[in-house]
Amino acid sequence: MDEFLDRKEGYEITEADQQMMTFDQEQLVGQFLLDRESIVRWSFTEVLESGLQTFNAPNPEELMLAASKVAH
């Protein structure tokens, strides 16, 4: 799937990408909610330490709660 998306988007693997792939590490996920002034008001990031939040994501209820707090 990654190779398909890379080709579709015209992305070319760099030397840095190759080096990271040899370490057998997965890409971490980060999600951020910014307000109108571009200030980060909420964030979610994967953490490799102790497997905390690895391959995890916030559920829709968490996202809606965060968005409603920023909207006020």
Image (cartoon, rainbow, N blue to C red):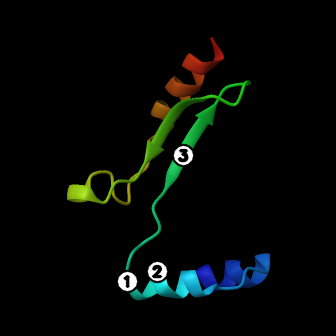
* Residue 59 position (above or below residue 24): above
Q: Which mark is residue 20?
A: 2
- State the residue position of label 3: 31
**Residue 9 at x, y = what percent?**
78, 75
Kindly state the secondary structure of the residue where label 3 is placed. Answer: strand
Q: Crowding near pointer 2: few (<14 within 10 Å), some, many (20+)?
A: few
* Residue 59 position (above or below residue 55): above
Q: Which mark is residue 23?
A: 1
Quarter of the rendering containing residue 36 = top right
Quarter of the rendering containing residue 11 = bottom right
Kindly state the secondary structure of the residue where label 1 is placed. Answer: loop
* Residue 22 position (above or below residue 68): below
* Residue 52 position (above or below residue 38): below
3D distance between C-alphas at marks 2 and 1: 5 Å
Disc count in the image?
Answer: 3
- Amino acid type of disc 2? Met
- Amino acid type of disc 3? Gln
Residue visible at 45% across and 61% down? 28
Tell me the mark number nearer the camera, choosing from 1 and 3. Answer: 1
Q: Residue furthest top?
A: 72
Q: Are marks 1 and 3 in contact (CB under 8 Å)?
A: no
Kindly state the secondary structure of the residue where label 2 is placed. Answer: helix
